[in-house]
Image: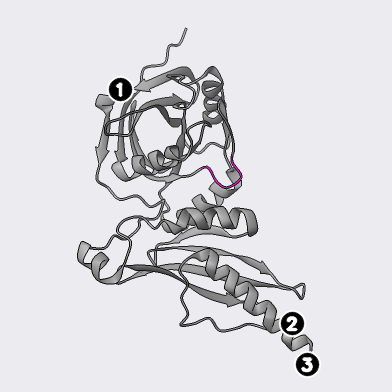
Amino acid sequence: MFKPKKPDIQVFVPAAALKAIFDECDGFDVDETGGRLIGCYRKKGNRYEIEVTGIIGPGPKAKRTPTSFFQDGDHQEQIFRSLEEQNREIEHLGNWHTHHVNGYPTLSSGDQATYQRTVNHHLHNTDFFYAILVVQKTDTQPRYKIKHFFFRKNDPNTYEILDENIRITDNPIIWPAPVKTVSKRQDDNNGGVHGANPERAKDRDYFSEHHPQFKPLFSKSLDSIYWKGRLELIDGASADVMLVETEENGRVFYNATVSGHDSLIDFAGRSFKSAREAISKVEKEINKHIFTRSRR
């Protein structure tokens, strides 16, 4: 009987990718969470070299319980396709999720069955599936203990990748989009926030509830995150709105551009402290303009 040869696997994971995973885990101490792993790989014979270049989060419509997790696949696919336009070599490498909330130290039988079905699906683009499992929160660095697993097409085995085959790198990631940091002097002089932009999480929750048709994307040419979608207006028409995050002199702000409607206001030169403030002002001012014009 044919016995598959154990694959030789080397994985390169940027510290920034682990930080993105751990930051997501920090927000959930009862329910499981997770997301997608994207990047590139090289294969020669039985050897695989896998390089993670991005982490896609669960998405606003993800479903969570203490023992299960279901991703918002449509949201994740939209982000992946937008990144793929600028990074043609990227692939969907696999998934990550967490068991640190329920104490189960390895993949469940359901996890393994799901990943086996995925890797053997005729639409799956590679002959392997790579999975990261967060198993325990720690009081030291790194913040969480993780395990790595590998599945291969037409191979019933689940392979745990040893720590000696995992290399943590300083390479940048393409998603989540990097946030430019500013120097301590800039912080002192300009009131800027050093490190991550705390408004992003609030924006995400706001858009998920009030404007789910808007999606966060990343522009490589602008080197920036932006929100894009169609805004429904009081006259029954709609307008295309793009809200671009910009960092200048230690301050993060958003600019709005609007098109696709004949009653538009020029928002050039105006800035907003968050994407949610921007969309709220854009919607209010355009609707006010439409209403005022209709009464003339």
**x and y percentages locating residue 222 in the rendered image:** 39, 68
Identify the mark nearer the N-term, 3 or 1: 1
As drawn, the label of residue 291 is 2
Magenta span: helix, strand or loop, mainly? Answer: loop
**x and y percentages locating residue 9 in the rendered image:** 32, 27
- Which region is colored magenta? 58-62
Name the residue nearer the viewer: 178 or 26: 26
221 with respect to 29 (left or right): left
Look at 26% across and 63% down and name the residue there.
Answer: 182
> What separation in Å lies between label 3 and label 1 (alpha carbons)?
73 Å
Q: Quadrant of the C terminus?
A: bottom right
Q: Which residue is mark 1?
A: 162
In magenta stretch: residue 53: no
**Circle 2: element type:** helix
Q: Which residue is mark 3?
A: 296
In magenta stretch: residue 60: yes
Q: Is residue 142 above or below residue 296?
A: above
Identify the mark nearer the N-term, 2 or 1: 1
> What separation in Å lies between label 2 and label 1 (alpha carbons)?
64 Å
> What amino acid type should be assigned to the residue bearing mark 3?
Arg
Q: Nearer the viewer, mark 2 or mark 1?
A: 2
**Circle 3: element type:** loop
Name the residue nearer the viewer: 119 or 223: 223
